[in-house]
Image (cartoon, rainbow, N blue to C red):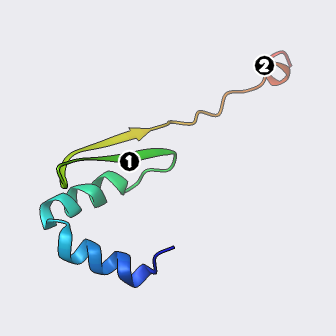
Amino acid sequence: MQKLSEITDFVNKDVPQPALSRILHALKGIRYGAVEIVIHDGRIVQIERKEKLRLDVPSERQVSR
């Protein structure tokens, strides 16, 4: 397993700043879901954000009361 400092060095050196900003923006505020980074030929070409919205739906017992 890599050390955090190795990952930070990789990100700072090899990930372009615009891509890093968009990844951080995709992560901001997400509570349930995923951020997928698509890479072709060593370059980030796509960032997808899939977010799940959890609703508090009352159970059948609570509705029938």
Up-down: is 61 above or below 25?
A: above
Question: Residue 60: x, y in percent?
Answer: 80, 18
- Please, what is the three-letter code of the amino acid marked with disc 1? Val
Quadrant position of residue 6: bottom left
Quadrant position of residue 47: top left
Residue at 36% from the left image edge and 55% from the top image edge: 27
Comparing 29 with 33, the one in front is 33
Q: Which residue is mark 1?
A: 35
Q: Secondary structure at mark 1?
A: strand
Question: Residue 43: x, y in percent?
Answer: 16, 54
Question: Residue 20: x, y in percent?
Answer: 22, 63
| The C terminus - image quarter | top right
Q: Secondary structure at mark 2?
A: helix
Residue at 31% from the left image edge and 51% from the top image edge: 26
Label 2, label 1: how many angstroms apart (C-alpha)? 36 Å
- Please, what is the three-letter code of the amino acid marked with disc 2? Val
**Mark number displayed over residue 63:** 2
Residue at 57% from the left image edge and 36% from the top image edge: 54
Comparing 11 with 22, the one in front is 11
Q: Is residue 28 left or right of residue 21?
A: right
Asked if the residue at tag 1 contacts the one at tag 2, i.e. Cβ–Cβ closer than 8 Å, the answer is no
Q: Is residue 63 left or right of residue 41?
A: right
Q: Nearer the viewer, mark 2 or mark 1?
A: 1
Density class for disc 1 (Cα within 10 Å; few <14, some 14-19, many ≥20) is: some
Density class for disc 2 (Cα within 10 Å; few <14, some 14-19, many ≥20) is: few
Comparing 49 with 39, the one in front is 39
Q: Is residue 46 left or right of residue 62?
A: left
Question: Residue 23: x, y in percent?
Answer: 27, 56
